[in-house]
Structures are given as C-alpha cells and as structure tokens.
Image (tube, grey):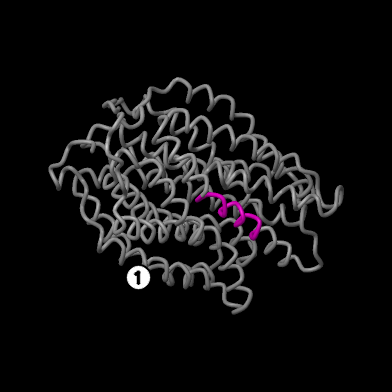
C-alpha cells in the first residue's frame, strides 16, 4: 500500500540533516587520511602510511553494496522512515568506534584491525542511507519540483564536505601538527558523533511516504538496461566526487601546501558544491535532466587536465581555490541530475533498494578505490597531474551512460504520476 505525501521543502529538513551527518562521519576519514595513517600505520616512509590509510578508507566501500541492498530492501518492505533511522544509528556507532580506537603505539596490530571493522560498519550504514533517503525525497516532492528536492541528496553530502573542511581548517589552524596527529583528528569525529542523537530525534518526526507493497501486488522489477546505465552514470559521478574529495590530501601531499590551506580548499569546494547542486536541480526541473548533464560532462572532459596542470604550475592559494570551485561546480551539474534521472525511472516498489544498491555498487567499484589509485598513479609516474587522467576516463564513461539515458523530467515527458 502506498500513499502520496507531498511535503513543503522545509518539512524534509530531517532527511537532509541526517544525510549530512552520515556523510560527514564517512568523509572526515578521507580529510584526515594523513593523520590517521600516522596513528594506525606507522612506517618509515610517510607515503606508505598514507597509502595504508587510503586503503582503509577504501575498505569502507566494500560493505556499501551490502548495506544498500539489505537496508534498501527493508525500506521497500517496511517503509522509508524505519530504514533511515536504522542506517543513521549504525553510522553513529561506527563513528564513535573510529574516534575511540587506541593507536598502534598503544595496542599494536589490534588498532588497525579495529579501525577496519568500524570502517566496514560505517560503509554498511552509509550504503543503507542513500536508497531510503533518496526515495523519500522523490516521493515527498511535487512532480515539477523533483529536481530541487532530490538535489538535497548531493547538496547535503556537500554540506558534510563543508562542515568537515571547516572543522579541519579550525583544528589545523589552532593545533600544532603533533596535537593534530595525536588527538585533533579524533575531535573532528566526535563533533559529528555528538550530533547523532539530534538526527535520530528529527528522523522519528518524519511522516512515511511508502508503507510497503499492497497484499497480492505483482512484484516490481528494475529493468536490466537501467541498472547498467545507472552503474555507469553513478560510477562516473562517484569517481569524480572522490577525486574532488581528495583535494585536501592532494594539496598537502602533491602541492606541498599547509594543512590549513588544504582544508581551506575543502571549504571552497563544499560551499561551491552546495550552491551548484541546488542550481542544477532547479535547472533540470525547467529544461530537463539530459541537457544539463550532457553540457556539464562535455565541459568537464575538456577542462579536467588543464585545470590540474594550472594547479601544478601555479600552486598558489588563488589558483588552487579557483580550480577547486570550478571542478566542484562541474561535478554537481553532472552527478545530481544523474541521480535524479535514475530515481525517477525506477518503479516505486523497488526504488529504495535499487537506488541504494546501484549507488553503492557504483561507489564501491569506482569511488572506493579512487583515492588510492590516484595516489598510486602519482607515486609511480611522478606526475602530479595523474588524478586528471583518471578523472577524464571516468567522465568519458559517464558521457556514454548519459547518452543512453532517457529523459525523465515531467516538464519534458508530461508524466506527473509517481509510479
């Protein structure tokens, strides 16, 4: 049984807050990869510690498809609200575990083992977060405002980037490098953990947009063609997003800028992304999803390598921040409309599970290894422009997927029903 629950935008704030907190917890690990590497993977070569840290960050992606499938299917059977509460509670447990795990110097090899286990839990929880929250946003939206409502999925993820960058900037500016290594990064995690109870209370206040299938109803299925296109589309988007999220580490490791400058770049890309996500959603409601995606991805393919060459040639604050803003805007105009199109194209009865699983598979396959790969490519080739090569290949894959994706915007198709 289903029911239409179109809500004012302010009423879905609880979804946005919970989503932002979940991604803050997950992404903070990436932003403090250097400090976490020194804490749990001490090595004579600093680059080896960073590689181990980035590999552990990638481990968190291994369980995201499982979480997307398990919690996503639970949302299709029991409703979006209980699934979102479950995913958020598990994420809270994972973030506290990471923050409180003793260092390698204190408990030896048990430290990285515990770290990996908590990252696996975080991955499972975040994989289960995306499907139910995306489905809820679509089902709560008036048909002609779906682009705007669904833009909140990526916009709130970018709020998490902005928040993590701001916290990192403050800590790196106020603390000595030794204190940042010793306890500063843990404080960043615990700040997110402190807000978890607020998110749980807010989510309990949400209405339900999907009460599960009606008795005797035929089981809906996601078309195979759409699944393949969706993995390519979101795989490209996730690879691009995690190249972007690597900016904090890239600025320190490859451009040799200070930690505070690097976190400043993260603030720039987070703020730019939030604005661009909302603008992209509004624009797709007016002109359709495909024109926005195709224009952005072509521009991105043309500009990716020159943008990184500019940062390497002129590793100054204005240039790095300008490139971060440009790339952030292009990622938003390719990624957001892709998720909107996929969600609209899926039947409601499998929407949460399918979106969550496709998203998580795409992230695990193309996003989880991204930061490790681009660091490895940079180390092997000795060329700091290497991330742009990887990014360009991912964008070409996305362009192919966009080309085969059908238009789904009601303004273009005239279809207003939430099937």
The furthest residue to the bottom: 381
Q: Which portion, as a residue range, is magenta? A: 54-65
Q: How many marks?
A: 1
The furthest residue to the left: 414
Q: Which quarter of the figure is the C terminus placed in?
A: top left
Q: Quadrant of residue 41?
A: bottom right
Work out whether residue 321 or residue 337 is closer to the camera in this orientation and state it: 337
On the image, the x and y values in percent for residue 177 come to 76, 51
Residue for point 15% across, 41% down: 415
Tell me: residue 54, above or below residue 416: below
Left or right placement of residue 151 versus residue 35 in this view = left
Q: Element under label 1?
A: helix
Q: Which quarter of the figure is the N terminus placed in?
A: top left
Left or right placement of residue 347 versus residue 134 in this view = left
Residue for point 47% across, 45% down: 68
Residue for point 34% across, 56% down: 227
Q: Is residue 61 magenta?
A: yes
Magenta: main secondary structure: helix
Please rate how many residues cluster around mark 1, counting C-alpha atoms within 10 Å: few if below 14, some from 14 to 19, many from 20.
few
On the image, the x and y values in percent for residue 109 come to 82, 54
On the image, the x and y values in percent for residue 294 come to 27, 61
Left or right placement of residue 301 versus residue 127 in this view = left
Left or right placement of residue 126 versus residue 349 in this view = right
Pointer 1: what residue?
302
Q: Is residue 353 magenta?
A: no
């Amino acid at each position: 049984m289903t029911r239409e629950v179109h809500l004012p935008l302010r009423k879905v704030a609880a979804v946005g807050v919970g989503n932002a907190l979940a991604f803050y917890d997950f992404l903070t690990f990436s932003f403090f990869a250097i400090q976490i590497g020194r804490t749990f993977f001490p090595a004579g070569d600093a680059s080896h510690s960073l590689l181990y840290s980035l590999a552990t960050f990638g481990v968190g992606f291994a369980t995201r498809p499982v979480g997307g499938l398990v919690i996503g299917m639970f949302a299709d059977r029991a409703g979006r609200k209980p699934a979102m509460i479950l995913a958020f509670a598990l994420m809270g447990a994972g973030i506290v575990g990471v923050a409180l795990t003793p260092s390698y110097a204190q408990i030896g090899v048990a430290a990285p083992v515990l770290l990996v286990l908590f990252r696996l839990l975080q991955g499972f929880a975040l994989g289960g977060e995306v499907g139910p929250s995306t489905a809820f946003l679509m089902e709560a939206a008036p048909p002609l405002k779906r682009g705007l409502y669904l833009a909140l999925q990526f916009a709130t993820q970018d709020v998490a980037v902005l928040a993590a960058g701001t916290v990192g900037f403050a800590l790196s500016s106020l603390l000595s490098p030794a204190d940042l290594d010793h306890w500063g990064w843990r404080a960043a995690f615990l700040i997110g953990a402190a807000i978890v109870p607020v998110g749980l209370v807010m989510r309990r206040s949400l209405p339900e947009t999907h009460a599960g299938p009606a008795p005797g109803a035929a089981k809906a299925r996601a078309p195979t063609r759409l699944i393949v296109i969706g993995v390519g589309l979101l795989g490209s988007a996730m690879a691009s997003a995690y190249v972007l999220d690597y900016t904090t580490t890239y600025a320190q490791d490859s451009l040799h800028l200070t930690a505070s400058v690097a976190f400043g770049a993260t603030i720039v890309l987070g703020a730019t992304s939030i604005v661009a996500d909302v603008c992209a959603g509004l624009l797709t409601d007016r002109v359709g999803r495909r024109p926005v995606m195709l224009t952005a991805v072509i521009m991105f393919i043309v500009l990716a390598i020159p943008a990184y060459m500019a940062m390497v040639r002129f590793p100054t604050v204005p240039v790095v921040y300008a490139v971060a803003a440009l790339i952030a805007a292009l990622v938003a105009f390719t990624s957001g409309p892709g998720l909107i199109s996929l969600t609209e194209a899926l039947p409601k009865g499998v929407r949460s599970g399918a979106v969550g699983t496709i998203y998580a598979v795409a992230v695990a396959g193309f996003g989880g290894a991204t930061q490790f790969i681009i660091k490895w490519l940079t180390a092997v080739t000795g060329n700091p422009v290497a991330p742009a090569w990887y990014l360009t290949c991912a964008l070409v894959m996305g362009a192919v997927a966009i080309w085969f994706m059908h238009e789904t915007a009601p303004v273009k198709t005239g279809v207003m029903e939430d099937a």
